[in-house]
Amino acid sequence: MQRERLGLQHKDLLFKRLRDISEPLSEYSFANLYLFRDNHEYDVVLGDHVFVRGKTYDGRTYVMLTEHVDRMGTACIEDQLEDADFLFPIPEPWLSSFPQDRFEATFLDGDADYLYTVEKMSSYAGRKLHKKRNLLKQFVESYSHEARPLTSDRLADARYVLDAWRDELGVDPASTDYGPCKEALQLYDELILCGGIYYAEGEPAGFVLGEEINDETFVLHFAKARTRFKGVYQYLFNNFAKILPPKYKYLNLEQDLDKENLRVFKSSYVPDGMVKKARVSLRK
């Protein structure tokens, strides 16, 4: 087998393979893998089947499948696990394909993606989201505002927001997703990304950036805003949900990586479901 560091040259190999998996997991995206290739030390393994090898946020070595397990059989998968801790991310519906006498599955809360209905995010309906409705109302009433598609002629405005977000955060950018987000804006067309950009008082105030992950789910890889505009995050999520084509039923805001600030933020929007991802290892 041949092993190579993941790069743009693997886009044609991986893009359609991952898209054909059709599970709503945020990792099944070439853009996601490429943009976070350094964080996870991704390699591509080429042979009779194609695998991606990487490291989790908690430092474990894993192997990622690039097609449904039933198309591969488990023998070649066992070979890949000789020098890896587990397979990841494995969707729950696939677990029945792994014989329980040879494999075992575990789950970590920090791995699971947050899933919301587009209907909920476009209305903030219900008692639990009344604070979001209030913040949205404050934003709309306090600032002149405008929502636009994130087209190539507006990428400079998005970069301005990203730099302002970095400065407001006041931490080492290397400990955030600043670098991957900056590269996503640089390779916006090449990575086949889509998004929206939002203005307040005539200034760039926020943007979202993502892609279709399956026929009914849109994943947001990045959402950045200038918090000096109170309610801007509630505005951008709400507006983007409203303009999504009707075929999309769900928004995926990805995992929280076991970080408390991300868990609080994403939980505050009351997810309609958590997309669990199994870590599947050989039984000892």
Image (cartoon, rainbow, N blue to C red):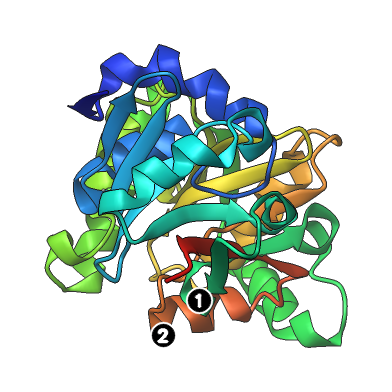
Locate residue 222 relative to residue 195 in the image: left or right.
left
Q: In the rendering, at what x and y percent does residue 35 appear?
A: 31, 39
The residue pinned by badge 2 equals 260
Mark 1 Cα shell of 10 Å, populated few (<14), some (14-19), many (≥20): few
Q: In the rendering, at what x and y percent does residue 29 appear?
A: 50, 36
Of the residues shown, which amino acid type is indicated by label 1? Leu
User: Residue, x 25% and y 52% (percent of image)?
Assistant: 83
Front-lying residue, 79 or 37: 79
Q: Secondary structure at mark 2?
A: helix
Of the residues shown, which amino acid type is indicated by label 2? Glu
Q: Quadrant of the N terminus?
A: top left
In which quarter of the view is residue 266 placed? bottom right
Q: Secondary structure at mark 1?
A: loop
Total count of labels: 2
| Residue 201 position (above or below residue 272) | above
Mark 2 Cα shell of 10 Å, populated few (<14), some (14-19), many (≥20): few
Query: Between disc 1 and disc 2, whose residue precedes?
Result: 1
Q: In the rendering, at what x and y percent does residue 207 appear?
A: 47, 47
Q: Quadrant of the C terminus?
A: bottom left
User: Residue, x 66% and y 56% (percent of image)?
Assistant: 99
The residue pinned by badge 1 equals 108
